Amino acid sequence: PAYDYRNADAYYDAVAAEIERLLEVSRGRALCLFTSWSGLQQVSDRLQAGRAGATWPLRAQGDALREALLSWFKATPYSVLLATRSFWEGVDIPGEELSLVVLDKLPFPTPGDPLHAARMRAIDEQGRSSFEEYMIPLMTLALKQGFGRLIRRSDDCGVVAILDERLTSKAYGRRSRQDLPPARFTREFRDVHRFYSQALGSPAEFALNVWPDSDAPQSWRWRLVRLSDGRAETHSGHADVSTPEHAEIHAALNGLEDLQRRIRRVGQESSRYAVELRCSRKAAQWLTEAPAQDELFKRWVQAVKAWQAVLPRAVRE
């Protein structure tokens, strides 16, 4: 999106929506870096109140001390951490614990900072361009540092998503991109989906996120995502059950039935498709340990037969 200080709310709506879409294909495991504290807070509020906060373990700078947050991030599968410039340097998270780095804007230094202002003024007084000679080089250096949070070892791989159209629309953005480490550049979401499908070895074309309502455990919600483009919609319902994990299973059954109807309406068969089920650890455990004669489990076994595969993934406790 294009940042406009006169309409920051719309910008951060778009940033939060794009982060949600990226998390669906990366399966969390993301470090989202912001150039301002205000930007972090705005996006954090949107994600925590929305679907991302229900699906992925999510924390933001300020929730705990820096080292405690980093320890939590490394120890928590599928986690998402939102942070500001203090996390752009000295963060070492190698391997599969981190596979997505999101930068909300090109990281220009703050012109109002007294040190930056004095140096820029000195350059301008000599008839030179402080923007070209000072601001752009510092932005490019910070961009490299943010990029470097992802690749810490020779066998690391992942996606760096820079959510600032100036990277391509402005000449200085295109020059800065050329100074980054070698990587494939794309503006197509399908390329991101294809990368993660290959990296994770997942055949899933759809994701079904399920969770119980925190205020009413017998109520459930499911969110169906078409992974190739991130399009999604959410539904809710109610089941007469005794545990939150049973509510999740009811949500999964309802979501699979809905998806199957849609596929059949376009003349296709669900047996051609794989679905990734994102649920709690207890729900995933129930699917492997439920008694064979349990009526709900029988319904589940029957529903799964209609698909190429249904792949449970425990993304939260």
Image (tube, grey):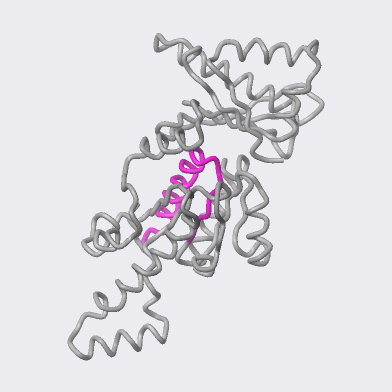
Tell me the residue at 46%/45% (across/down): 17
Taking the magenta stretch, the answer to whether it contains residue 21 is yes
Taking the magenta stretch, the answer to whether it contains residue 260 is no
In the picture shown, does residue 308 fall above or below 315? Answer: above
Residue 231: x and y in percent read 44, 33
Q: How many marks?
A: 0
In the picture shown, does residue 243 fall above or below 264? Answer: below
Residue 116: x and y in percent read 37, 83
Q: Magenta stretch mostly in which secondary structure?
A: helix
Tell me the residue at 44%/62% (across/down): 146
- In this rendering, position of residue 15 left or right of residue 188: right
Closest to the observer: 288 or 294? 288
Tell me the residue at 42%/59% (across/down): 147
Residue 271: x and y in percent read 50, 12
- Quadrant for the C terminus in the image: top right
Q: Residue furthest front?
A: 154
Q: Residue furthest left?
A: 127
In the picture shown, does residue 136 fall above or below 292? Answer: below
First to last magenta residue range: 6-33
What is the quadrant of residue 171 in the picture? Answer: bottom left
- In this rendering, position of residue 279 left or right of residue 196: right
Closest to the observer: 11 or 78? 78
Residue 60: x and y in percent read 60, 58
